[in-house]
Image: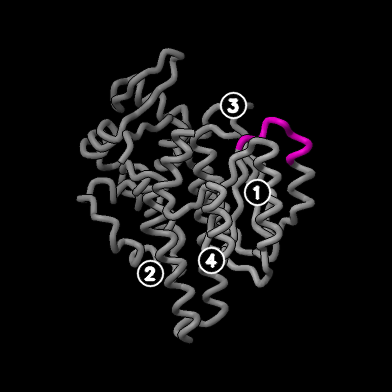
């Protein structure tokens, strides 16, 4: 797990107060904090927990901060808790749970691999077995996308570097956008300049974007499900990225065995877990 620090704007969101209030607490010594060379305040997880233990009155209205004082659980089966919040249509507890894990120092890859992806798989299985009505499946999947967006907004974006640009898109015929969102949030955290093209993106559309921007270093293509045969598309994509010296990354379970064999033969990066992918992004 990673060492976690928080800024006054992030902390203000949890207490539902203005950022200036958090700064006053810091300056008065009420909330311990460190200061960067540039004069910005940073509060560590340890400092946050110490403050919460001492000033319980500031925790009473926040589900997330209440949970910070509790003993941390292993995440292996915690996706069931998140799923139950979704099933009960309790968005506050659902997004609060994701934010809590992030505060506690879990990486984005760990949160996605152990909470969101198992939940999405379970939703799909329950619908296939007629244990979940279609309107519930749609509602819960949409809420997961909302929670991803809120988690992404909560994460502080680092300075964008022009030499580290990435384009994210879904393969032709693929309308499942959540894996691409997860990749985008991870890229955001580590300072990549991103261009998100969206669902069902053809090779022609990708070529236009790549030809327009010579600084692109990574191309992230997601394919959760597609009724199309993407073999020709993938071969041409590999040729294009090799010619332009762009790193190609394939995400999702929608790629066929034959397509994956071609990818492996050409040393294309495949995402087997988001923890592994996050480590790849960190080292890029």
Q: Which of the pair 113/218 is nearer the observer?
A: 218
User: SS of the residue at dot 4?
Assistant: helix
Q: Which of the pair 213/180 is nearer the observer?
A: 213
Which mark is in front, 1 or 3? 1
Magenta-highlighted residues: 210-217
Q: In the picture, residue 134 is in which quadrant?
A: bottom right
- Contact flag, marks 2 and 4 (Cβ < 8 Å): no
Q: Which residue is pictured at 64% across the width and 35% down the height? A: 245
Left or right side of 119 for 141: right
Q: Earlier in the sequence, mark 1 or mark 3?
A: 3
Q: In the image, which disc is placed on residue 161?
A: 3
Circle 3 residues within 10 Å: few <14, some 14–19, many ≥20: few
User: SS of the residue at dot 2?
Assistant: helix
Which mark is in front, 2 or 3? 3
Q: CA distance from mark 3 to mark 4?
A: 36 Å
Q: Specify whether residue 108 is painted magenta.
A: no
Q: Earlier in the sequence, mark 3 or mark 4?
A: 3
Q: CA distance from mark 2 to mark 4?
A: 34 Å
Colouring of the image? one colour
Q: Earlier in the sequence, mark 2 or mark 4?
A: 2
Q: Which residue is pictured at 44% across the width and 20% down the height? A: 40
Left or right side of 57 for 143: right
Q: Which residue is pictured at 59% across the width and 31% down the height? A: 164
Q: CA distance from mark 4 to mark 1?
A: 16 Å
User: SS of the residue at dot 1?
Assistant: helix
Residue on which disc 2 sits: 84
Residue on which disc 1 sits: 238
- In the rendered view, tell whether residue 16 sits above or below residue 171: above
Q: Provide residue 45's location: percent of width, then percent of height.
A: 30, 35
Q: In the image, which disc is placed on residue 284?
A: none
């Amino acid at each position: 797990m990673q060492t976690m620090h928080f800024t006054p704007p992030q902390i203000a969101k949890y207490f539902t107060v203005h950022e200036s209030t958090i700064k006053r607490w810091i300056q008065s010594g009420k909330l311990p904090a460190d200061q960067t060379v540039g004069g910005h305040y940073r509060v560590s997880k340890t400092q946050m927990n110490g403050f919460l233990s001492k000033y319980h009155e500031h925790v009473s209205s926040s589900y997330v901060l209440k949970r910070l004082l509790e003993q941390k659980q292993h995440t292996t089966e915690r996706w069931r808790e998140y799923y139950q919040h979704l099933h009960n249509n309790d968005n506050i507890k659902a997004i609060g749970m994701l934010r809590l894990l992030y505060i506690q120092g879990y990486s984005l890859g760990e949160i996605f691999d152990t909470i969101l992806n198992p939940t999405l798989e379970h939703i799909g299985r329950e619908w296939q077995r007629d244990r979940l009505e279609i309107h519930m499946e749609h509602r819960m999947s949409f809420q997961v996308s909302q929670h991803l967006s809120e988690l992404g907004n909560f994460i502080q974006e680092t300075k964008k570097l022009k030499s580290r640009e990435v384009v994210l898109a879904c393969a032709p015929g693929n309308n499942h956008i959540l894996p691409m969102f997860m990749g985008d949030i991870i890229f955001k955290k580590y300072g990549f300049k991103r261009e998100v093209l969206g669902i069902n993106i053809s090779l022609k559309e990708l070529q236009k974007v790549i030809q327009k921007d010579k600084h692109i270093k990574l191309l992230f293509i997601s394919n959760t499900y597609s009724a199309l045969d993407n073999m020709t598309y993938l071969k041409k994509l590999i040729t294009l990225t090799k010619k332009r010296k762009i790193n190609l990354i394939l995400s999702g379970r929608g790629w066929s065995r034959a397509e994956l064999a071609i990818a492996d033969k050409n040393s294309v990066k495949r995402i087997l877990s988001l923890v592994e992918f996050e480590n790849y992004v960190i080292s890029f």
